[in-house]
Image (spheres, rainbow, N blue to C red):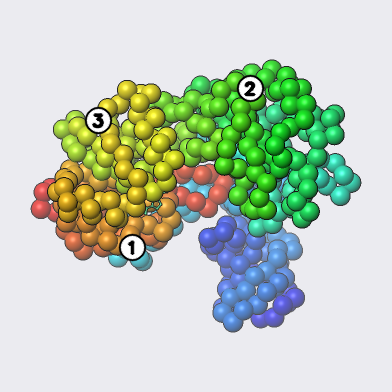
Amino acid sequence: MKKNEKIILTIEDIGVNGEGIGKAFGYTLFVKNAIIGDTVEAVVTKAKKNYGYAKMLNILEASPYRVPAQCPVARQCGGCQIQELSYEAQLSFKTKKVRGNLERIGGFSSQLLDEIMEPICDMKEPFYYRNKAQFPIGTDREGNIVTGFYAGRTHQIIPNTECALGVLANREILECIVDFMNAYGITAYDEETQAGLVRHVLIRYGFKTKEIMVCLVINGDNIPHADKLVDKLAKIEGMTSITYSVNRENTNVIMGKDIGVLWGQGYITDYIGDVKYQISPLSFFQVNPIQTEKLYGLALEYAGLTGEETVWDLYCGIGTISLFLAQRAKKVYGVEIVPQAIEDARNNAKINGIENVEFFVGKAEEVLQEQYEKNQVYADVIVVDPPRKGCDETLLQTMVQMEPQKIVYVSCDSATLARDLKILCENGYELTKVRPVDQFPMTVHVETVALLCRKDQK
Ligand code: SAH
């Protein structure tokens, strides 16, 4: 296969970045925007020894799973990858992905998975679910101020104020800001020259409280005529917090380090279940609150708490799972590496009057081992929610030594989940339940919750 060669192929799978995967003469090709079931004409853009990349030219026979994209810019935008795949087909792809990894990497039998795997937890309305959006502000070739999303893997702005994953209020807020910038000659930041003022707009929305936060990230100390902007923004229903963050660095990091309040409070409030959270522009907060509630509800259900248990919540972030579990446990210990997240976690415990939680800053693998060796800490249940790379092996060892009755594993990468479950199951545990959760519809990502029980204590 050579570059510029034209081929016809049928798409059979979806790659990690959402691209279609098919074969032509036994040679594997990755084709962007082609979906499972499509037969397409494509041109090879890059040919490696065993695989290559191709650009779709025509759809010769459309997949039965193909649907029109909700967003006019779905193909260019880097945010969604599989908007043109029907939601049903997305769910079955995600289920297969989790199951495939558990079989191949985890070594779990198909028969066992038939018995214990629960159907993927879906969304009734798989759009408009994100409570957070960060819009870059820039200038187009004609000199107009534009805002939207970066095209996949670039910093070219695709103008779009109506993202189908974001909340509807985004549009009005962005229009307000662009109008203000035009009216007062406020410039947009230019990454190449590092000149210009406004870099990004962060918008957050509390799904339960309907509170809105706007934070402008600026390359300067202040926003001239900010009072005029505030006048307009404050009139938007639900507006609770208008802030700015100074970021003068030449960096891909969006937010600056500090926040200045222009109007209202420096945070918004929202709920997951009955637990209240204060969310500042710099706080981490799950972006899909509807599915997060289901995900953590599932973790709680799997933990099977009666009120008597001691629970460790490792990789606890701002303590979302810890506080959820604390309502049904005797004591919860949370461990997280980012100190600000733990500050948020402690504050969230306080504003909810939850007193049976204690948080540690540090690496889960180090804190747990130290606490176990020095203080002989105990756990009935250990919950882990690690980043994509999964759990550190020494952590798995400590967990095995501690012999909790149950381990609840919340995962955002089913490959590392399968790897870690295999180790735990070789060391006294049994996989008893698994459920994928569709936390990010229209993207290739899938979350999974798994329950492990100690074989000798069942
Ligand atoms: N359950 C959390 C989110 C977990 S995301 C919540 O709902 O808020 C994974 C978290 O693990 C992140 O907060 C990340 O900062 C943290 N982390 C990464 N490596 C870690 C480590 N070695 N030890 C402890 N925490 C870690």
Q: CA distance from mark 2 to mark 1?
A: 48 Å
296 to 66, vertically: above or below: above
Please name the residue that numbered disc 2 is placed on: 263
Image point 38% across, 51% down: which residue?
Answer: 386
- CA distance separating discs 3 and 2: 35 Å
Q: Which residue is mark 1?
A: 419
The quadrant in which residue 109 appears is bottom left
How far from the left and from the top, in percent, is residue 399? 22, 54
- Binning the other alpha carbons within 10 Å of mark 2 as few (below 14), some (14 to 19) or many (20 upward) gives some
Q: Is residue 167 visible?
A: no
From the image, tell me which residue sits under label 3: 356
Instruction: Look at 50% across and 37% down and name the residue there.
Output: 283
User: SS for tag 3?
Assistant: loop
Question: Which mark, residue 130?
Answer: none
| Outermost residue, front side | 221
x and y, in percent, of residue 307 in the image: 19, 30
Tell me the amino acid under the disc marked 3. Answer: Asn
Choose top left, top right, bottom left or bottom right for residue 216. top right
